[in-house]
Image (spheres, grey):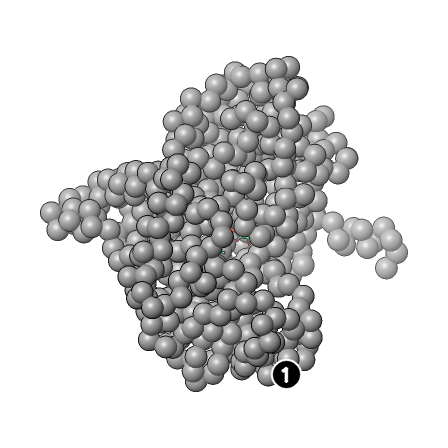
Amino acid sequence: MNVQAQIDADSPRTTEHFDVLIAGAGISGVGAAYHLATQCPGTTFVALEAQKTYGGTWTTHRYPGIRSDSDLHTFGYRFKPWTTAPIASAAEILKYMGEVIEENDLAPHIRYRHTITSAKWSNEENLWTIEATRTDTGEKFRFTTNFFWMCQGYYRHTEGYTPEWKDMAKFKGPIVHPQKWPEDLDYRGKRVVVIGSGATAATLIPAMAKDAGHVTMLQRSPTYFRTGRNAIEIAEELRRLQVDERWIHEITRRKILFEQDAFTRKTFAEPEAAKKDLLSAVEAYLGKDYDIATHFTPKYRPWRQRIAFIPDGDLFQGIKSGKASVVTDEIDRFTEKGILLKSGKELEADIIVTATGFNLCANGDIDFEIDGKPLDFADTVTYRGMMFTGVPNLVWVFGYFRASWTLRVDLVADFVCRLLNHMKQTGVKKVTPELRPEDHNMPILPWIDPENFNPGYMMRGMHLLPKRGDKPEWQHNQDYWAEKDEFPQIDLKDRAFVYS
Ligand SMILES: Cc1cc2nc3c(=O)[nH]c(=O)nc-3n(C[C@H](O)[C@H](O)[C@H](O)COP(=O)(O)OP(=O)(O)OC[C@H]3O[C@@H](n4cnc5c(N)ncnc54)[C@H](O)[C@@H]3O)c2cc1C
């Protein structure tokens, strides 16, 4: 085939146009679709999703016990009540999302197995041209859209993060990352070592401990956990009183958010007292003789990394029963039989699980261009963690770390729909965030202050992320309690928005 024939074969034959194009059909993309359908009637839109179904995180992760680490009253949408126990399995979350799609007739707006590969903005046409490839047939598609709503999450779905340890190839058994869980992995009666101490490790360990011979959590340093009953008293009480589920959802959300706000403030104002609260809850499960100082007392202030909720203390119950244990040490190298630790001890294993986190991916691996020039988001400054200087008609949904992600999905959606309706009413085609004259001397800083929040994947990927300023408009402040009041008040005529 000559070069031109090859180009023709690889090129999409038709171009479809939508007013809004959404990247991804996870909790953010489905939320965006719902809000567009309800708040911007008449707007045409499509969501392109690389996977074969909706759910994002909850489809990608299939490891034993996979569940939320925050409550579903706030991880669920504001508009659809969550009616069962607050910590939910991936299957329950997918069922809930499926109902949102069905009840609101969103299915015709979602195209699965479509990976977006490039997004090119033209200032002449005031349009994004989006190219996508079907994952099953390799067929190419081209779309144009006025507005690009990026709901592609924050990490690469195709592969997780596994550090390179010495002699990994020598280990005789399987080494598994939770993001790529083999369906046929048989761990019954086997010795499993899970490397990691975050929410994934804390979920996997009690789930695997039921059938495995023994599960060891190997951590370099400990993490904070919250624990308690997988139930919310006020929701149970209101249900007993046969209150409408919509009211229960709203009241329970308010109660949870009120308490989370108080706890978050405590971690900043009285970190030692907050730490004591967290550690005494662990001690209540493990007893005074357990070495909590070594295994469950992190060196950092609470909330500098995400705090996972352990329902019914199942991780601690697994440890107490002897089916699971914790080793706090560093890896020297892998061996045929397991892992040699820096202390000199060897941990023997049949299976090693690397619950070592994600690869941050800020742009969904999409090649961005503006008027033919490659766009690097690291060269931009963020407008409230959702828009970017010099990038027209584009919003990215990046949720909260200290509160449920979805709270921000709803807030950002309200803002986008208000913005789109405003642009329609005023007849403008383009909105670009730009620093105002009063912002020009503002310090330009990394996306997030590591003193504030510093998990490994953020630290590893900070150079890929947009920059922030030191004013509320020019940063993602991670503060739901401020943003819930500030977002509805955003003045669309502010000079930070340049329209044409
Ligand atoms: C195991 C696990 C548990 C978690 N638990 C919680 C929790 O309890 N509470 C909480 O608040 N947060 C939790 N998080 C964080 C979680 O990722 C978010 O809360 C939320 O699910 C993110 O939703 P999202 O739709 O923005 O992104 P994702 O869930 O990441 O979905 C993005 C979707 O976009 C698609 N996509 C990406 N790039 C492209 C492309 N180029 N073209 C087409 N499609 C693309 C992906 O295939 C994916 O389906 C958890 C994360 C993990 C990994």
* The N terminus, quarter of image: bottom right
Q: Position of residue 25 (x, y in %)?
A: 50, 49
Q: Which corner quadrant holds the C terminus?
A: top right
- Residue 83 falls left or right of residue 203: left
Q: Residue at x 62, y 63 (%)?
A: 162
Residue 233: give x, y in percent of width and height: 20, 50
Is disc 1's CB within 8 Å of ligand 1? no
217 up-or-down from 309: above or below: below
* SS class, disc 1: loop
Q: Nearer the viewer, residue 120 or 340?
A: 340
Q: Residue sitting at 38 percent across and 77 percent down?
A: 323
Residue 203 image offset from top left, x and y in percent: 42, 64
Compared to residue 430, the image places residue 204 above or below, namely below
Q: Nearer the viewer, residue 305 or 270?
A: 270
Above or below residue 391? Residue 401 is below
Q: Is residue 467 left or right of residue 87?
A: right
Type of the residue with mark 1: Glu
Please say whether residue 18 is visible from this viewpoint.
Answer: no
* Image quadrant in which you'd find residue 174: bottom right
Specify the farthest residue to the right.
Answer: 2
Q: Is residue 492 visible?
A: yes
* Residue at the (56%, 38%) spot, across then down: 449
Number of disc labels: 1
Badge 1 crowding class, 10 Å Cα cut-off, few under 14, some 14 to 19, many 20 or more, is some
Q: Nearer the viewer, residue 328 or 311?
A: 328
Tell me what residue is drawn at x 33 percent, y 38 percent.
262
- In this view, 359 is above or below 462: below
- For label 1, the residue is 336
Residue 121, by quadrant, is: top right
**In this picture, residue 447 sits left or right of residue 222:** right
